[in-house]
Amino acid sequence: MSRDLLDDKIRQLEDEFLLLGSMVEQATQSAVESLKNRDGILAQKILDSDRLINEKRYAIENNILITIATQQPMAHDLRLLAAILEVISELERMGDYAKGIAKITKRLGDSETPIPIRDMTKMAELDMSMLHRALTAFIQEDYHAAAALPQEDDAVDAIYNKIFHELIEAMTKNPEFIDNGSLLLWAAHNLERLGDRVTNICERTVFIATGELFDMDTSEGEDPDQEEI
Amino acid sequence: MIISETRPPETTNSLLTSEDVSIFYNQFRAVKNVNLNIVPKKITAIIGPSGCGKSTFIRAFNRMNDFIPGCHLEGKLLFHSENLYTPNIDPVRIRRKIGMVFQRPNPFPKSIYDNIAWGAHVNGINENMDIVVEKSLKDVGLWDEVKKDLKKHALGLSGGQQQRLCIARLLAVHPEIILMDEPCSALDPAATLKIEDLMRSLARQYTIIIVTHNMQQAARASDYTAFFSMDSDRAGLMVEYGVTDQIFTRPVDKRTEDYVTGRFG
């Protein structure tokens, strides 16, 4: 039996989904770049473009609801649409992390605060590499690749823990650094949470392929209520 | 009646328009004051519970109700701005331009070839019949399935193939509008989806109006949807008309919401 119209709609949704993913990747890279260069203008651009990410997410959500209501997808098709619905929410929140880092860039302004930018850049690189491969695995429904990715988040967590201890130590030694040091903790925290959300995307890839939902998160003791600044 | 905010576009040179149409069976009013503008080269679905007048309404478009004693129409049904119910209108000419596909496939008791050629010949088509038959069968996706069996009896085809043959027979006389009255109710799911795919490809050239009890079919296959219901006097009326995506996700009228969510009808 052919479902040409449904297949067309799913293809369009996948294209839009990948576009949203690339918008989030771009925003994250730019956010770390703005922090590195203390670039307030770039930071403002990221704040402005977050609206586009949110709008894209809502447009995809609306199209999925219409597709479910009008095309009655079943089984694999239904799981795919449900998974996209979940993952666009993850992507939109990742965009919020980038926005949070851009806000921190603006709040730091031209202060002389030392930024552990090499480690933060490394975190962002690892996050983006994981995100890119997670989205590719999602579209290709490659659940072997998706199942292997969450382990890589351990490297992001390790760098975050290193930054965390260094910043705490610096703040202990120099109480004047506490304000800006806290902001930098938040920026690093956002990058750490970004990696966690890649794991959530991988869970949905496995769900599409197998129909099974389970927790792939390898990290412990996170604080999901404090996800962004 | 609610015309939804995402209403079908107003067309200045409307192909088919219903202006305040009421249809009566003797004293009983079966359809009440319907105003509807059919969008050319799109698929419009008419949905609603049994007895809401949707089949009566669609049959009025090609004067099929003329065969029912006591049935008469008030208001205007305009085809290319011409009132279909003025006395000088030739119903046979209208039925050529506005063809109909019925609930059960009704091929003639003749060969596959003759089903198309005979209908075309009777309707004054003076073209090379081999070409007409081949093109019509190709347009409905039936050619590859029957090209070696054109002389075989049409009743030997499956139900879905017979229905596509009936659509091919209709295409051979070059209609502008295709009316479909529950065209898939006698077909299995696979044959139903084939007809829906066919509707989608035909809508590039033709305007299609489909009456269906199957809400899912209306949702899947149509561009616009009109929801009919019954008034307190049991007359059918159009409750809401809008873009199909909107009717099935954000209906404006509570009665439409109740119907599409299965809480009524």
Image: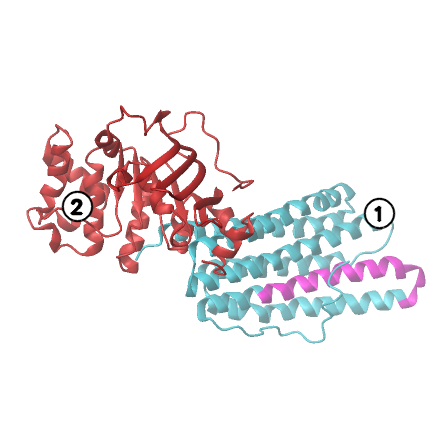
Chain colours: A cyan, B red
**Residue nearest the viewer, comparing B261 with A198:** B261
**Residue nearest the viewer, comparing B16 with A79:** B16
Q: B26 above or below A32? A: above
Q: Is residue B101 left or right of residue B208?
A: left
Q: Residues within 10 Å of mark 2 (few under 14, many from 20)?
A: some
Residue furthest out toward the left: B151
Q: Where is residue A1 in the image (x, y as percent from the top left)?
A: 30, 58
Q: Which SS class for mark 1?
A: loop
- Say which chain tag 2 marks: B
**Residue nearest the viewer, comparing A118 with A158:** A158
**Residue nearest the viewer, comparing A95 with B132:** B132
- Quick check: is A190 in the magenta stretch? yes
Q: How far apart are marks 2 and 1 (CA)?
A: 72 Å
Q: Which SS class for mark 2?
A: helix
Chief secondary structure of the magenta portion: helix
Q: A82 above or below B39? A: below
The residue singled out by tag 1 in the image is: A109
Amino acid identity at mark 1: Gly
Q: Where is residue B129 in the image (x, y as percent from the top left)?
A: 10, 34
The residue singled out by tag 2 in the image is: B143
Amino acid identity at mark 2: Trp
| Numbered range of the magenta stretch | A172-200
The quarter in which the C terminus of chain B is drawn is bottom left
Q: B96 above or below B225? A: above
- Quick check: is A26 in the magenta stretch? no
